C-alpha cells in the first residue's frame, strides 16, 4: 500500500514539474527559450512571430531555472549578475553591454564602469558591443499581407530619466521617434530585463514586408548610461488579445493621454481619470493639455492585476507638440488596436469603462501550453483533471485500505 501511494505521489509530482518546465522553458508563443533565433507561424499571438536572441536575462544561466525569470509575466524580475560572459553565438545586439556611439568615456552607472574596463583592455572575457546597438531580424514573409505590427524589446538598464541620456531608434534607416520616446521616458534601474512594446505605424509596413528589419538604438549625448537588450520580438498581424494588462491613472481633467510606443490616446475624465489596456511589461504615458506643460510617467503593468497606477500631474505653461504620427502613415483613430480609443475616459474606477476588455485579471485566459483550454490558477485544465483523478484514486485506496484493516482486525 505504501509503495503504491509513493508511486502515485511521484507521478503527481512529475506531472506538475512537467507543466512548470513546459511553461518556463518553451511555449507555443515564444518557442524554445534557449534558441537564439525563432520564427513561428500562426500562434495565438500573431500570424508571424520573429524572435532574435535567447530568453535568459543576458546570459544568466540560473535566471530561468533557478530564479523564475519570465519577462512575459511582467512580475518584478530577477536581478541578474553583471558583467556577464560573452557568447559569440548570441545574435548581434543581444546580450551585450552598450554605451552608444557618442560615448565620451565617463561612467555614471555599473554597466558603463564595466565598459570602461573593456575599452581599457582589462576585461576580455565579458560581453560588450561597440557603437550603436544593432539588431537584425530576417524572416520569410512573401505570402503575408502586413495589417498590423508590434515590436517588443526586452530592455535591460535603460535609465534616461536618471542620467539624462537620450536614445534614438531607427527601423531600416528610418527614424522611429515613437520607440525612442518610450525608451527615453522609461526609468529602469537594474540589472533587470523587462519588455517594452511599440505598435509600428503603417508607414513601415513595406519595410516589414521585405523580410528584413534592422533596428538601431543609439545614445546621443555621450553620457555613460550602459544598457543591453536580452531579446527582440516582432509580432506581424497580431491578435488584440496580446493586450492582457490594464492600468489606470490620473492627470489634469480633460487632458489628452497617449500610451507611449503607440499613437493611441484617451481623454481624461472630469476627475482626471484614464484607463488603458496594455501589453504586460514596462509601459509609459504622456499627458498634455493646452496651457500646460506635457508630462510623463512609467511603470510595470502585470498580465494579471495592476502593479502600476500612473500619476501625471500637469503644470501651467507652454507645452511642446506631440509626435506627428501622420508622417508615419497613421490617420486619426487608425491605430486604436488595443481596445482604447480617442474618447473620454472613465473616472478611473474601472466601471463602465469603454476600454474594459472584460477580463482584467486574466482569469479564464487560454492555456499557454495548448492555447485551447482555460487555465485556473495558471494550470492547464487537463492537468487539474489529472490531479483531481490522482487525488480521488489516493482517497479511494486509503478508504479501501482502512476498511480492509478493520476487517482484518475483527478476524
Image (cartoon, grey):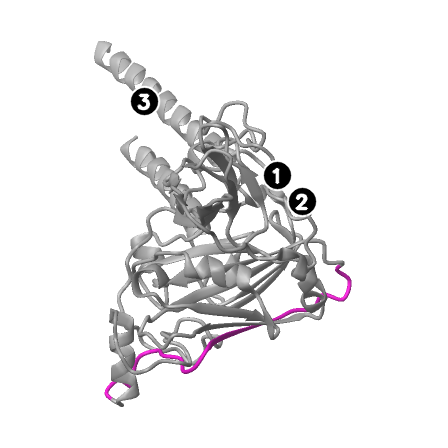
Task: Determine if the magenta segment contains residue 264.
Answer: no
The vertical placement of 142 against 250, above or below, is below
Q: For residue 306, what is the image quadrant?
A: top left
Residue 333's tag is: 2
Q: Position of residue 366 (x, y in %)?
A: 55, 38
Q: Nearer the viewer, residue 312 or 93?
A: 312
**Residue for point 30% across, 17% down:** 404
Residue 341's tag is: 1
Instruction: Identify the secondary structure beneath mark 2.
Output: loop
Instruction: State the residue position of label 3.
Output: 398
Q: Nearer the viewer, residue 13 or 215?
A: 215
Q: Is residue 95 visible?
A: yes
Quadrant of the rendering where the C terminus is positioned: top left
Task: Give the CA separation, mark 2 to mark 1.
Answer: 7 Å
Instruction: Identify the secondary structure beneath mark 3.
Output: helix
Q: Nearer the viewer, mark 3 or mark 1?
A: 1
The vertical placement of 194 against 396, above or below, is below
Q: Badge 3 local density, few (<14 within 10 Å), some, or many (20+)?
A: some
Check whether the beta carbons of the residues at disc 2 and disc 1 lie within 8 A of each other: yes
Task: Determine if the magenta segment contains residue 133.
Answer: yes
Q: Badge 2 local density, few (<14 within 10 Å), some, or many (20+)?
A: few
Amino acid at each position: 500500500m505504501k509503495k503504491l501511494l509513493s508511486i502515485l505521489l511521484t507521478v503527481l509530482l512529475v506531472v506538475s514539474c512537467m507543466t512548470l518546465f513546459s511553461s518556463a522553458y518553451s511555449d507555443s508563443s515564444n518557442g524554445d527559450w534557449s534558441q537564439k533565433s525563432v520564427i513561428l507561424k500562426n500562434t495565438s499571438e500573431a500570424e508571424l512571430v520573429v524572435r532574435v536572441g535567447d530568453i535568459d536575462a543576458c546570459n544568466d544561466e540560473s535566471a530561468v531555472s533557478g530564479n523564475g525569470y519570465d519577462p512575459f509575466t511582467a512580475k518584478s524580475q530577477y536581478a541578474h549578475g553583471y558583467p556577464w560572459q560573452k557568447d559569440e553565438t548570441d545574435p548581434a545586439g543581444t546580450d551585450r553591454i552598450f554605451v552608444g556611439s557618442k560615448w565620451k568615456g565617463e561612467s555614471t552607472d555599473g554597466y558603463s564602469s564595466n565598459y570602461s574596463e573593456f575599452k581599457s583592455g582589462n576585461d576580455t572575457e565579458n560581453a560588450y558591443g561597440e557603437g550603436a546597438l544593432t539588431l537584425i531580424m530576417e524572416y520569410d514573409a512573401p505570402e503575408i499581407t502586413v495589417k498590423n505590427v508590434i515590436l517588443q524589446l526586452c530592455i535591460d538598464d535603460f535609465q534616461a530619466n536618471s542620467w539624462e541620456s537620450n536614445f534614438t531608434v531607427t527601423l531600416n534607416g528610418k527614424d522611429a521617434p515613437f520607440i525612442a520616446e518610450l525608451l527615453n521616458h522609461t526609468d529602469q534601474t537594474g540589472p533587470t530585463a523587462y519588455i517594452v512594446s511599440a505598435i509600428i505605424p503603417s508607414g513601415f509596413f513595406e519595410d516589414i514586408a521585405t523580410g528584413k528589419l534592422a533596428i538601431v538604438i543609439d545614445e546621443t549625448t555621450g553620457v555613460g548610461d550602459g544598457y543591453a537588450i536580452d531579446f527582440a520580438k516582432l509580432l506581424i498581424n497580431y491578435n488584440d488579445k496580446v493586450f492582457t494588462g490594464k492600468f489606470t491613472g490620473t492627470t489634469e481633467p480633460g487632458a489628452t493621454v497617449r500610451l507611449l510606443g503607440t499613437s493611441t490616446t484617451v481623454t481624461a475624465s472630469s476627475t482626471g481619470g484614464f484607463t488603458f489596456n496594455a501589453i504586460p511589461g514596462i509601459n509609459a504615458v504622456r499627458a498634455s493639455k493646452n496651457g500646460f506643460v506635457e508630462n510623463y510617467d512609467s511603470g510595470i503593468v502585470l498580465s494579471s492585476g495592476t502593479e502600476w497606477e500612473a500619476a501625471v500631474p500637469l503644470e501651467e505653461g507652454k507645452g511642446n507638440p506631440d509626435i506627428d504620427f501622420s508622417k508615419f502613415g497613421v490617420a486619426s483613430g487608425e491605430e486604436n488596436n488595443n481596445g482604447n480609443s480617442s474618447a473620454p475616459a472613465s473616472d478611473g474606477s474601472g466601471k463602465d469603462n469603454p476600454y474594459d476588455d472584460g477580463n482584467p485579471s486574466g482569469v479564464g485566459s487560454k492555456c499557454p501550453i495548448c492555447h485551447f483550454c482555460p487555465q485556473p490558477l495558471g494550470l492547464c485544465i487537463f492537468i487539474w483533471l489529472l490531479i483531481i483523478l490522482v487525488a480521488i484514486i489516493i482517497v479511494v485506496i486509503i478508504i479501501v485500505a482502512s476498511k480492509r484493516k478493520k476487517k482484518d482486525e475483527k478476524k
